[in-house]
Amino acid sequence: MKQRRFVQKNQATFTHFVSVPLILQPTQGKLQKLMDDIHKKYNFDQSMNPNNPFLFHITISMLGLSNQEKINKARQIFIDNEQTIKNYLKNSSIKLKGLGCFQNRLNQQNKYYKRGPYEDLNIIYLNVDETPLLPVSDFIIRQFLQAEIFDSDDLKSMNLIMDQQSKMFRAEKFHITLFRLKDCKINFQQLFDEYKDYQFGDVPIQYFDISTRWQYDKDKFYQPLARIVID
């Protein structure tokens, strides 16, 4: 399986992100059980840090809303396009299947370091079928570009790409983070062999948010700057 490299760039400038929250039952409980089962079996060197189960989500796009003008613009885009976004996502569900991973970015000092595809990991995630997310992702990214909340030069640092087949803007990889790893020396080949065809099932899309980093609501999820409830 081809691995993608996780690029962490200019993270400090990102204040918000567009997300699909996965915070309602039974989805949240099933995700936590999967995470707990993997953690008990494979956390050999105590380097696997489980995600907070109250924060499960799929990121559509990071946002750097550095001033009140940009905050107001982003919120207004959601207000003005609420029905369009609902139409994209109404009666949609997302298929979750199999695990994936991001490796740590190689720097100048270790760029020739030889590693296998399941070594030196940064994140272990659950794969997300991108099909129902591509149209709404492309739509909202184009709205932000048009409003000059970010420009085309920012896309690479935001891990956004133009899908060559569909010609739609999208995240490089839609995923649900299960674990973050630090200084991990384990080869997780056995884990990925066991879970490569794992069938989590379909989950409904119930919310579409602009989420605020480092701020949390009464349900312990990221505080919404704007939220659309999908009927």
Image (cartoon, rainbow, N blue to C red):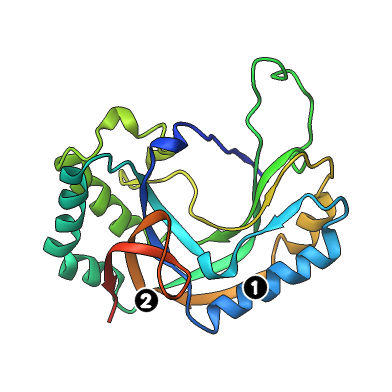
Q: Is residue 129 left or right of residue 15?
A: right
Taking the view exactly as shown, the residue that stands out farthest to the left is: 80
Estimate the x, y position of residue 135 in percent, counting from the top left.
30, 57
Which amino acid, by three-letter code, is at mark 1?
Answer: Gln
Q: Which mark is residue 32?
A: 1
- Figure check: 137 above or below 216: above
- Name the secondary structure under disc 1: helix
User: Left or right: 145 with respect to 107?
Assistant: left
Q: Earlier in the sequence, mark 2 or mark 1?
A: 1
Position of residue 73 measured from the top left corner of the image (x, y, whole percent) = 15, 49
User: Contact, CB < 8 Å: mark 2 with mark 1?
Assistant: no
Tell me the SS state at disc 2: loop
- Relative image position of residue 150 (x, y in whole percent): 25, 37
Please state which of the two labelled residues, at mark 2 or mark 1, is closer to the viewer: 1
Residue toward you, 182 or 97? 182
Q: Residue shown at 15%/44% (left/top)?
A: 69
Q: Residue at x 61, y 72 (%)?
A: 31
Q: Does residue 210 show up?
A: yes
Q: Quadrant of the C terminus?
A: bottom left
Is 111 or 63 nearer to us in this picture? 63
Number of numbered markers: 2
Image disc number at residue 206 = 2
Q: Tell me: 129 left or right of 186.
A: left
> 203 above or below 49?
below
Q: CA distance from mark 2 to mark 1?
A: 18 Å
| Residue ID at (54%, 34%) | 7
Q: Is residue 108 above or below residue 18?
A: above
